[in-house]
Image (cartoon, rainbow, N blue to C red):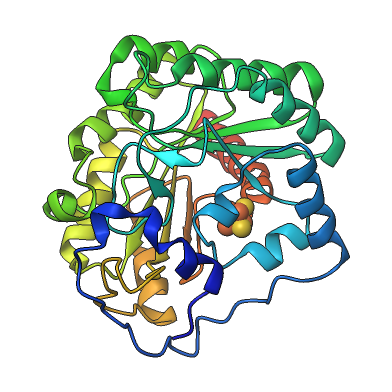
């Protein structure tokens, strides 16, 4: 496997991972094919982000889809800085003490969304456990700025768990994003090693709370596979998600960003992904995306259109009964 040199240079961004032994992962399987980042539209997207001094998770997390997405002018904004207060074992976003919030950032995101002419935008963030409200109000202000500058754009948010504080959850839910996306990431057994700062049932409860407070809001959650989970454990997570009323499940292959990150334990084949997609569909999700390169925000705009259509079909069928 060849690593992106930019990401290797940034390995020191993870002081907590430096003690880990180097674990070279070997060659990626043939089905993990990505388009090299290049092209006019890709460069335009990059220039716009730099000019507006905005951060994207596409770059910070070293997403394999960046060539394809940016060429189509799709990007996922990452707000509240580039430094995260947590230290998930799979994540390439830098860990440390973040800087103060940039109060003008919500407006800059709104202007960039308007300038890019986006139909649908995804906004994520680093975890800000250092802030009293974990950044909930900054999320709300960003949603409001997008609504003001680009009223025709649908908004999908992908926040952290706001340390489990229901008042902060409700504040963000009440800003009425079109899609509330929060990734469970992995199975509960692996949380202590893979997602040590998070709690499985807290994340699940957040998604359940969205439906309690605003049943019209779409909920979405994602899993990364290849971390050592079993098919049975994935099936249990799917059941938990359905009980919490989650509409849309995404499942993608974990890719190890640097030798200091947790290694890939299993490369799930395209056929295995098809099997997972079949199971998820049978469990009743409104929408399922399960392929090796599925990411939470990949094709999010097109998927939102399909999600709405799926709900309309479901309502029509229920009415006809
Ligand atoms: S899949 Fe999401 S994070 Fe990756 S490049 Fe596309 S928009 Fe960015």
How many numbered marks does the figure carry? 0
Please indicate whether residue 13 sits to the left or right of residue 239 in the image: right
Q: Residue at x 66, y 15 (%)?
A: 144
Quadrant of the rendered structure where residue 193 is?
bottom left
Percent of width and height locating residue 27: 40, 90
Observer-nearest residue: 103 or 218?
103
Residue 222, relative to residue 231: is it above or below?
above
Q: Residue at x 45, y 18 (%)?
A: 136
Quadrant of the rendered structure where residue 39 is?
bottom right
- Residue 102 visible here: yes
Percent of width and height locating residue 2: 48, 84
Residue 198, relative to residue 4: is it above or below?
above
Observer-nearest residue: 167 or 259?
259
Observer-nearest residue: 295 or 14?
14
Which quadrant of the figure contains the N terminus?
Answer: bottom left
Please indicate whether residue 44 sits to the left or right of residue 98 in the image: right
Q: Residue at x 49, y 22 (%)?
A: 100
Percent of width and height locating residue 147: 72, 19
Residue 237, relative to residue 315: is it above or below?
below
- Residue 298 visible here: no
Residue 5, relative to residue 29: is it above or below?
above
Please indicate whether residue 214 sits to the left or right of residue 203 in the image: right
Image quarter where ligand 1 lies: bottom right
Please indicate whether residue 48 sits to the left or right of residue 318 in the image: right
Observer-nearest residue: 73 or 257?
257
Percent of width and height locating residue 273: 39, 72
């Amino acid at each position: 496997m060849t690593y992106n040199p930019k990401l290797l240079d940034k390995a020191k961004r993870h002081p907590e991972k430096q003690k880990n032994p180097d674990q070279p992962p070997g060659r990626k399987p043939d089905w993990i094919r990505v388009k090299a980042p290049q092209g006019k539209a890709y460069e335009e997207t990059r220039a716009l982000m730099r000019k507006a001094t905005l951060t994207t998770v596409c770059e910070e997390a070293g997403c394999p889809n960046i060539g394809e997405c940016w060429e189509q002018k799709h990007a996922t904004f990452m707000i509240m800085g580039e430094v995260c207060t947590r230290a998930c074992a799979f994540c390439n976003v830098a860990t440390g003490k973040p800087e103060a919030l940039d109060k003008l950032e919500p407006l800059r995101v709104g202007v960039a969304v308007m300038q890019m002419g986006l139909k649908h935008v995804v906004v994520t963030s680093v975890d800000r456990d250092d802030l009293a409200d974990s950044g909930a109000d900054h999320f709300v202000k960003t949603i409001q700025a997008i609504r003001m500058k680009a009223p025709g754009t649908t908004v999908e948010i992908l926040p952290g768990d706001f340390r489990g504080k229901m008042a902060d959850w409700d504040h963000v839910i009440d800003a009425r994003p079109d899609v509330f996306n929060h990734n469970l990431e992995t199975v509960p057994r692996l949380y202590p090693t893979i997602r040590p700062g998070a709690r499985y049932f807290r994340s699940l409860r957040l998604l359940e709370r969205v439906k309690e407070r605003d049943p019209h809001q779409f909920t979405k959650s994602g899993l990364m596979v290849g971390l050592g989970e079993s098919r049975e454990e994935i099936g249990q997570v799917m059941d938990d998600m359905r009980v919490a009323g989650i509409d849309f499940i995404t499942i993608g292959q974990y890719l190890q960003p640097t030798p200091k990150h947790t290694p890939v334990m299993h490369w799930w084949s395209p056929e295995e992904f098809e099997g997972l997609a079949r199971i998820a569909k049978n469990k009743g999700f409104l929408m399922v995306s399960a392929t090796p390169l599925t990411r939470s925000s990949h094709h999010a705009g097109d998927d939102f259109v399909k999600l709405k259509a799926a709900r309309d079909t479901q309502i029509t069928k229920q009415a006809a009964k």
